[in-house]
Image (cartoon, coloured by chain):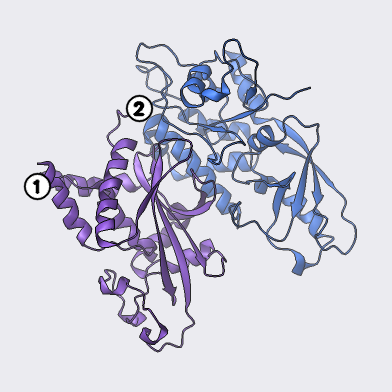
Chain colours: A blue, B purple
Amino acid sequence: MSDDKDVLRDVWFGRIPTCFTLYQDEITEREAEPYYLLLPRVSYLTLVTDKVKKHFQKVMRQEDVSEIWFEYEGTPLKWHYPIGLLFDLLASSSTLPWNITVHFKSFPEKDLLHCPSKDAIEAHFMSCMKEADALKHKSQVINEMQKKDHKQLWMGLQNDRFDQFWAINRKLMEYPPEENGFRYIPFRIYQTTTERPFIQKLFRPVAADGQLHTLGDLLREVCPSAITPEDGEKKNQVMIHGIEPMLETPLQWLSEHLSYPDNFLHISVVPQPTD
Amino acid sequence: MEDEFFGEETFQQYCAKFIKHSQQIGDGWKWRTAKDCSDGYMYKTQFQIKTGTMASHLGTPASAQTCLPTEEALELPLDDSEVPGSTAASEVIKYEYHVLYSCSYQVPVLYFRASFLDGRPLSLKDIWEGVHECYKTRLLQGPWDTITQQEHPILGQPFFVLHPCKTNEFMAAVLKDSQKINRNVNYVTSWLSIVGPVVGLNLPLSYAKAAMQDEQLVD
């Protein structure tokens, strides 16, 4: 269905209008203007904010600049989470633009991973892809690829090249004709209310009787608090890429079409906003 | 969902046996269950003196270090007078080791973090530099594939991790050999004795004897 291919493009090209403001206690030589940027939902903060860094470093002295880190309403932002996930989880009920504060000192060692270079982002991204394929294909598809294919996946993401990325990624979305889907579905469910950063378990896309499992089936099994009881009021939103898919959606279809470039479904469970 | 070869339940059983022996010899390993779930991890805190490499053996000059430490070398001196005269600056580092189960790879994974006594954490660079000489070559071939900083899946805090994707490869040989002589192994004990030394964690040999005894009791 050509509609399905359109979904892949819509997911890839999703953007969040963001306003970056320098933390007020940073030492500047003159006033720092806020910096506006459209952030790709499927990328990572430290991969797409070189311009932000340069903009603020222009008004600071070299010696006052240490590793950059970002924060939203007091919460340090994990650069190793996709941008769209961070927004859905922390700011989806707020008005746009997304207001992010930029820091250059007092790196929160207990909360954030360091990002010493682009190599760190590549290593993290590839590590997620490998884990996703371990779940989908026992690592067979990704291990059969050549190094240059792995590089192409990374370059496609880094340079925002949808066709370059999907030329290789489509192989990771295939499965043997005799099966009805992947071995297990790569997913992580995030909530801000738990100490555990995310829920990740083994879950098959197809039931023993051959029926396709749905998003609702997954939630009932691994995160029942996200599901509204029969006669109860809807307390939570189950969100991926800023939308709430119907709970009847087959999980296999979601995995093929709404995964992030790392091949994981990153699902946010957030409180229903009270308008 | 326990239809795979090595499931979470089996992992917990291996850890229980491992910890039982640890308690017998006072090796300090404990189990912690996650607050919201039945999963959990094995953990241990250890103090080491850093004089250049992680597995520095007190009383052994650096040039005479071997890859397989003796049991005596694992004990910290109680006072400075026991440390041989050395002009190299040395600092005490606190290591925390956590053994978790990865359902994606169906193997155990070693997480660890290290800090100086004043709370300053060690950097990834410090960790890479501290890897024992024996393993340096392998590390330098692909540092980003070997040890990186990652989020602890239960605590959500930054830890260093020894990548699990190659575990099956080297454990397959161990398991195959033990099957040949019809002996069951404690997977966690065997695995930890292989990966631990890379990052300064050594297991006394008595763990191996304990694993053999466990298996004999079952027979």
On the same chain: label 2 and label 1?
yes
**Where residue A250 sits in the image (x, y, percent)?**
51, 16
Q: Which residue is mark 2?
A: B1
**Where residue B149 sits in the image (x, y, percent)?**
51, 54
Report whether B68 appears left or right of B51.
left
Quadrant housing the C terminus of chain A: top right
In the displayed structure, B20 sits above or below A259; it is below
- The picture quadrant where one finds residue B11 is top left
Residue type pointed to by label 1: Ile
At x 33%, y 47%, the residue is B167
In the displayed structure, B218 sits above or below B150; it is above
Tag 2, which secondary structure? loop
Q: Which residue is mark 1?
A: B181
Taking depth in this image into account, of A195 and A118 the one nearest to the observer is A195
Tag 1, which secondary structure? loop
Residue B7 visible in the snapshot: no
Taking depth in this image into account, of B31 and B172 the one nearest to the observer is B31
Q: Earlier in the sequence, mark 2 or mark 1?
A: 2
Query: Closer to us: mark 2 or mark 1?
Result: 2
What subunit carries mark 1? B
Taking depth in this image into account, of A253 and B121 the one nearest to the observer is B121
Residue type pointed to by label 2: Met
Report whether A61 appears left or right of A114.
right
